[in-house]
Amino acid sequence: MRSRPFVTVHLAQSLDGRVALEGMATPLSTPEGRALAHAERAAHDAVLVGASTIRIDDPRLTVRDAPGKSPLRVVLASALALPRGAHVLANDGHALVIGAEGRVVEAERIAFESAGIAVAVAPCDPDGRVAIDGALSILADRGVERLLVEGGSKVVTSFLRARRVDRMSIEIAMRFLGAPGTPMLGALDVGTLDQAPSLTNVSVERLGENVIVRGDVVYA
């Protein structure tokens, strides 16, 4: 039996590896890509994003463009600093906010719980963010076996640095965003090429004008 959920990262990026224009919502998926993203949500027990994604994109994280049930919506927000009216915080019993020990603002926790939003607190990593293994332990205790991570860049980087991504699904838009657009990843502590994570069992498919690359993650 696995001690943590199986983790799939699903995201859309430009040809030059950017996931968004700086500080603004940047829809890069085709209609076919959005339908696939919703099908991925339906195939997982929970879908996870970071606080920045909520503030910039305000996603619903529900299943609408594919058959199936909506998963548990999870937000990593170290200090619980999230907009009160965010779609993801709908009081339907299917949302969870995970904060970091030593960072959680007690007044925010009380406000969320009073509004019917579940809050959990995980250990803090050296950068002051929610520790990935702590978050995965919380989700495993809640019965989550398959977790879909949709971003943003800092969250995906943290999962890869922790070696907790099992599979990646990357929709590539036929556009160049350039700097200062948000890169897909931050530093991974890769000093040589043989230290770099890679994909195996790779498939490539068309999604309208875009393509999607999928594969299993291999760590050095």
Image: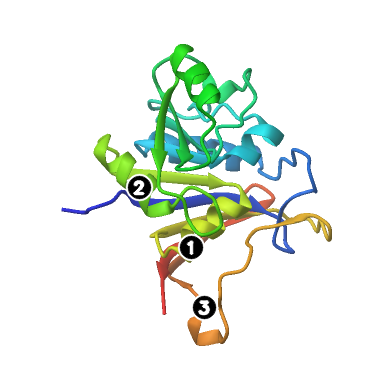
- Number of the label disc, if any, that sits on residue 160: 1
Mark toward the start of the polypeptide (2 vs 3): 2
SS at mark 1? helix
Question: Percent position (x, y) of residue 106?
Answer: 50, 27
Task: Say which element carries label 2.
Answer: helix
The answer to which quarter of the image holds residue 77 is top right
Q: How crowded is mark 2: few (under 14 residues within 10 Å), some or many (20 or more)?
A: many
Crowd class of label 3 (few under 14; some 14 to 19; many from 20; radius 10 Å): few
Q: What's the CA distance linking mark 2 and mark 3?
A: 23 Å
Badge number at residue 196: 3
In the rendered image of this protein, does residue 208 appear above or below residue 71?
Answer: below
Most extreme residue toward the right is 179
- Give the mark nearer the N terminus: 1 vs 2: 2
Q: How crowded is mark 1: few (under 14 residues within 10 Å), some or many (20 or more)?
A: many
Q: Which mark is residue 151?
A: none
Looking at the image, residue 14 sits to the left or right of residue 123; the answer is right
User: In terms of secondary structure, where does tag 3 sit?
Assistant: loop
Picture layout, residue 125 above or below residue 59: below
Residue at x 83%, y 60% (from the top left corner)? 178
- In-image side of 92 versus 138 (left or right): right
Amino acid under label 2?
Leu
What's the amino acid at mark 1?
Leu
Quadrant location of the C terminus in the rendered image: bottom left
Q: Do the residues labelled 1 and 2 touch (CB within 8 Å)?
A: no
Foreground: disc 2 or disc 3: 2
Q: Which amino acid does label 3 sit on?
A: Ala
Q: Residue 135 in the image: x percent, y percent?
A: 39, 45
Image marks 1 and 3: residues in contact by CB distance under 8 Å: no
Q: Of the two numbered discs 1 and 3 on the same chain, state the one appearing first in sequence.
A: 1
Residue at image mark 2: 136
Residue 3 shown left or right of residue 191 in the figure = left
Between 39 and 79, the one lying in front of the other is 79
